[in-house]
Amino acid sequence: MLSRKFIGSVLTLSALAIVTNVAYGKAESETETAYEGAPSGIDPATAKNLITSEGPAMTVEEFNRSKKIFFERCAGCHGVLRKGATGKPLTTDITRSRGDAALKAFITYGSPAGMPNWGTSGDMSDEEIDMMARYLQHEPPTPPEWGMKEMKASWKVLIPVKDRPTKKMNDYNIDNIFSVTLRDAGQVAIIDGDTKKIINVVNTGYAVHISRLSSTGRYLYVIGRDAKVNMIDLWMKKPDNVATIKVGLEARSVETSKYKGFEDKYAVAGSYWPPQYVVMDGFTLEPKQIVSTRGMTVDTQEYHPEPRVAAIVASHQHPEFIVNVKETGKILLVNYSDVDNLSVTTIPAARFLHDGGWDSTHRYFLTAANKSNKIAVIDSKERELEALIDATEIPHPGRGANFVHPKYGPVWATSALGNDNITVIGTDPAKHEDHAWKVVEILHGMGGGSLFIKTHPHSSNLWVDAPLNPDAKISQSIAVFDIKNLDKGFEVLPIAEWAGLGEGPKRVVQPEYNKAGDEVWFSVWNGKTEESALVIVDDKTRKMKKVIKDKRLVTPTGKFNVYNTVHDIY
């Protein structure tokens, strides 16, 4: 017999599910979960089954089906080993205490914390939900490791260095080229920012997470969620792949060396699984050194078997990569001056480190510890933690936005997933000491669900998206503030409406400037089988300037301008 407490919780979840399902709809639910909870790049078949007598009865077929569902829909938030990250832990001590009924209710109806309503949305059948409830009460199957042997077996140099152009073989203004992620196509579109035409569509790994450029701007590096790194030569007559490698089974981050004397020399990629990073030759992607990130958490000092590598940036002050280790809350300064003898300095910060970017001087790295609701500030020159700043709720800056505040001087800003806060932090300890590393102002945007915030040194506009907001009108729009008149609030621009698309969720995501800082590009991210577009807005007038439509633009999300990415301008 169910307790009154449990019945009440189910009724609450049921009521919530009605609201959630009406607000999101099936298409929106799929799109939302696709961003942070996209299918894992890990092949479920590689993870050994762990059916034990301690869990509910399951057949091998049921376990295999459930394992596939978990890797496709759940691992991105809860972790491969179910230790939790963006989503809560789902270890057996928790799931078995909950039991079948509570787990099925949770999977069916979701939660206000962001758990999708897999049942009421129609994404999972009753049979699948029953299987998943039982599956979660068995020990999580562990995928295989991925070491030097596996990396070298996957490594391909498609065009050797000696056979590559010795000068630029095209007429493109490379500084104003954009790399655009075509998420569900497993491709990136290389687009000429001057003519607005697609130069090439390059095959990559699945769901490219970021694009990064070599310090010279010649080589484009992208990494998919399946941990495949593609190296693209922009000097070729038609830019295309020159080298590839698979650095693990699931990954999010890649970066290149920028310190003077090491330009283009090294690349680094960090994995979700296995939890590790690898330093590679910057011209060929040959793997040089692999370093595990498993270890103790910064707060409770307990061992964590799956501390995933999140953001990586290249220091401008030392020959170092700055590596965020998500679950342990540690920031690593990886010195590559002697790649055969890597020197690693560990800086304790806060758990659940995610994304971040530089201040305008490129000395201080500001990064979100999202579920800890904090921003960590690293002084890359002195190689130490400068500050730990409160920022609610679930800050998600992308790279953040730097601008000069009329009152507080140089600042850096982040938006958030969990509320409408745009947190503005002072970044000038030299001339504005009283405001440095403090929240000087909180602006209010359109609402929770923002992923990216953007401005440019030549602009007085601050752009904030909200693609994960459940209100379609909000998720299809962009908020823009006048930096010189922040008290006036924001103007809403109907970006998706300007795109003139048909059916679909049409989420507007990730503003990105051109090199000159007079255009802002937006992705109108529609369903895989629906038409998407890029909308270009004149930064001065805030009017639509151009819409790029092409059948090859499948689920465009992130966009990266070459010049701005090379020089960390945001």
Image: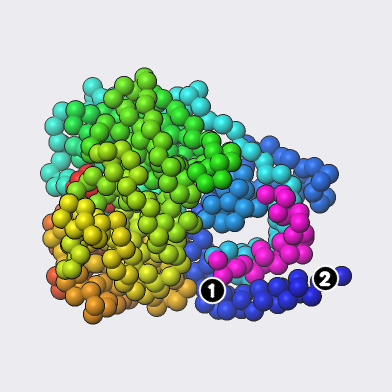
The colouring scheme, among rainbow, by chain, secondary structure or one colour, is rainbow
Residue 405 picture quarter: bottom left
Give the dominant element type of the magenta stretch: helix, strand or loop: helix
Q: Residue at x 64, y 38 (%)?
A: 142
Mark number displayed over residue 2: 2
- Left or right of residue 563, residue 15 in this image: right
The amino acid on which the numbered mark 2 sits, given as a three-letter code, is Leu
In the rendered view, tell whether residue 204 sits above or below residue 517: above
Horizontal and vertical percent for residue 558? 34, 55
Crowd around label 2: few <14 · some 14–19 · many ≥20 (10 Å): few
| Residue 280 is covered by the magenta coloring | no
In the rendered view, tell whether residue 234 sits above or below residue 464: above
Q: Secondary structure at mark 1?
A: helix
Please tell me which residue lies in front, 387 or 194: 387
Q: Secondary structure at mark 2?
A: loop
| Residue 103 is covered by the magenta coloring | yes
Q: Residue at x 48, y 64 (%)?
A: 32
From mark 1 to mark 2, how far is it between C-alphas? Answer: 30 Å
Point out the frontmost of discs 1 and 2: 2
Quadrant of the drawing holding the C terminus: bottom left
Horizontal and vertical percent for residue 337? 28, 25
- Left or right of residue 309, residue 441 in this image: left
Please tell me which residue lies in front, 95 or 528: 95
Crowd around label 1: few <14 · some 14–19 · many ≥20 (10 Å): some
Q: Which residue is mark 1?
A: 25
Q: Residue at x 76, y 71 (%)?
A: 6
Q: Which residues are magenta?
A: 91-113
In the rendered view, tell whether residue 485 sits above or below residue 381: below
Horizontal and vertical percent for residue 452? 34, 61
